Image (tube, rainbow, N blue to C red):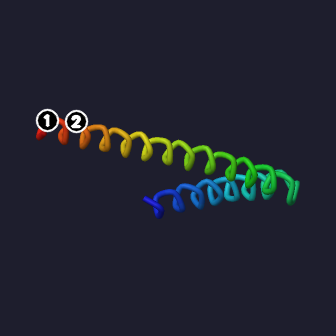
Amino acid sequence: MAWRMVIEMVSGLGIGFGIGYGLDVLMGTMPWMMVLFTLLGLAAGVKVMLRSAKEMNEERAADMADEEEDDRGNS
């Protein structure tokens, strides 16, 4: 799960950097678009990473609730 979160963060940064660099080359605005889109990629990576963490916590809470229910049924 930790690798998934790292990959999400790095891919957001990489995609943002790539888009920004490409726009800078096309428009000749070096390095403004690269900086802007790298920051946007970072923000997107953080957002996706936080959503993944929330999903993992919800799954873990559901698993714990199921275990408690099983323990009550066996008593």
Q: CA distance from mark 2 to mark 1?
A: 6 Å
**Residue at the disc numbered 2:** 69
User: Which residue corresponds to the image point at 26% horizontal and 40% vertical from the top-left?
Assistant: 68
**Residue 47 coordinates in the image, percent (x, y):** 61, 44
Q: Give the number of the disc on residue 13.
A: none
In the image, what residue type sits under mark 1? Gly
Q: Which mark is residue 73?
A: 1
Compared across the picture, whether 52 is left or right of 10 comes to left
Q: Which secondary structure, mark 2?
A: helix
Task: Tell me, yes or no, whether the two marked residues, 2 and 1, touch with CB atoms within 8 Å.
Answer: yes
Instruction: Return the residue nearer the eye: 28 or 53.
Output: 53
What residue is shown at x 72% (from left), y 56% (from top)? 22
Task: Please name the residue shown 86% across and 59% down the image.
Answer: 31
Amino acid at dot 2: Glu
Total number of numbered discs in the rendering: 2
Q: Nearer the viewer, residue 10 or 16?
A: 10
